[in-house]
Amino acid sequence: MIHDKYIDIAELADTPSGAVRIRGYVRSNRANAHVGFIDLNDGTRFSGVQVVYDLDAHPEFAAATKYPTGSSIDVAGQLVFTPDAKQPFEVRADVIELVGDCDSDFPMQKKRHSLEFLRDLPHLRVRTNTFSALFRVRNVLSMAIHEHLQSQGFMWVSTPILTGNDAEGAGETFGVTTDSDAEGGFFGKPTVLTVSGQLHVEPFALAFDRAYTFGPTFRAENSNTTTHAAEFWMVEPEMSYADLDDDMRVMESLVRHCVAAVLDRCAEEIQFFNDRIDETHTLTERLTATRDTPFRRMTYTEGVEILEKSGKDFKYPVKWGLDLKTEHERYLCEEVVRGPLFLTDYPKEIKAFYMRLNDDGKTAAACDLLVPGVGELIGGSQREERYDVLLARMNEVGISPETLSWYADLRRFGSVPHSGFGLGLERFLLYVTAIGNIRDAIPYARTPGQMAF
Ligand code: 4AD
Ligand code: MG
């Protein structure tokens, strides 16, 4: 019987050799007549540990040879450092107990499954190497975002998920209903799931100097792409006394800090993505360059000129005024600058009403950060702080000022220049891991036609 306190695999490297007890899942188990090897993983670390069992010394281990992939076991043994072997240490078992057997139809046997296959098994794919690495990086990335913004004086605030307005004005909201619904329904007015916390975070930035919201966001875009999800996480920092330039400095320092944190804290995971997921095996190199090199900038107008002269046969032909598609964004950052690129000063018609109108009367003080492999990672802008100009823009795009009078009021009660942006966490993960599909960057993907659990 096993009695001792158990140890995480994550702690083994710091444990003096000697008696240890670990619990985890069998990834693989092979044995000959004399000795057996179990690759054991308890989820505390990307790599598992090799458990060696000696069938000559312990005839009772005959039972252990039958413990299948996917079963959970409890092992007491001796930790032995193995400097000459592939893995730095192993556990030589004294006792192996079966905790939970695994039925033979366990869908994840030894062979590698496609990401598509695993997508229907979000409850089990988290035990694979790929998703173990991915969700570890997601955790580090999320914490690095908080950490960096906190260090820059941003206060975290949770903006609501249920809201009465469509911040982006793009009409891509999911309605929230009770049986009685809409007017006269539960909230007395039509209510939707938030598409952005920006409008709700602005009052906090104007009260606390700098604030951010970081939470789930919902968009009913019926576009079946590798970068759009119906539910995703967005971080939205917002700051007072900041113009677009200040905004881009914060975006860049945030992205570079987070990439540095992942390189530093997820070395094993990034190595895995570099070797096994990234087709060109240049992920580490790209991330190192992102960490170390200032981002390039160009205006939308310059970008359009480059695209027009590129001679490329785009699906959507380019002309000034076009809301650039992923193919154009990716061409600019992948083939022209070969790295992250800020595109600035977009035509006001293709951007949201709250973006500050530039002096040319045609463009807005807006920017997108485009990154290779993904396209748009961040969208941001300086906000229109002039009451009259904001109201004129709302009228132009057909937003009745009464519905957002509280938002416009901020421009009457001590208005200050301010700026902010939104970064999609899953797109950031796509960039940092080279995983090609947003459905694999979120625990339970919600995309058109997909609601696995
Ligand atoms: O560019 P977007 O629509 O900007 C806003 O929502 C602003 N209110 C942000 C702000 O200034 N506070 O979205 C911001 C980012 C995009 O750049 C993208 O990374 C991500 O959110 N995003 C999505 N990610 C996954 N699936 C979707 N359907 C997404 N839509 C936007
Ligand atoms: Mg955008």
Image: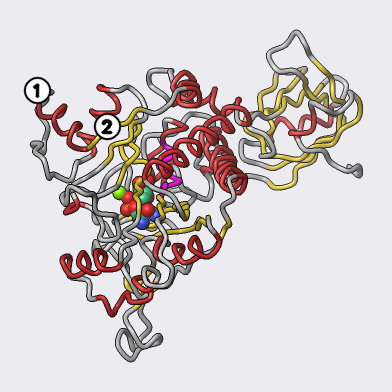
Callout 1: few (<14), some (14-19), or many (20+) C-alpha neighbours within 10 Å? few
**Which residue has dot 2 on it?**
298
Q: Quadrant of the C terminus?
A: bottom left
Amino acid carrying label 1: it is Gly
From the viewer's perspective, is 36 left or right of 126?
right
Judge whether 311 appears above or below 95 on screen. Answer: above
| Rendered residue at 41%/24% (across/down) | 278
Quarter-of-image position of residue 373: top left
Q: Where is residue 75 in the image (x, y as percent from the top left)?
A: 81, 36
Q: Looking at this rendering, what residue extends furthest in the bottom direction?
A: 184
Q: Does the residue labelled 2 lie within 8 Å of ligand 2?
A: no
Is residue 93 highlighted in magenta? Answer: no
| Rendered residue at 46%/21% (across/down) | 289
| Rendered residue at 29%/78% (across/down) | 403
Q: Where is residue 410 in the image (x, y as percent from the top left)?
A: 40, 70
Identify the magenta region.
422-430
Indicate which disc residue 98 carries: none
**Which residue has dot 1 on it?**
311
Ranked by sequence position, the earlier of labels 2 and 1 is 2
Q: Is the magenta stretch mostly helix, strand or loop?
A: helix
From the viewer's perspective, is 20 left or right of 151?
right
The mark lying in front, picked from 2 and 1, is: 2
Judge whether 300 appears above or below 271 on screen. Answer: below
Amino acid carrying label 2: it is Met
Name the foreground residue: 39 vs 221: 221
SS of the residue at dot 2? Answer: strand
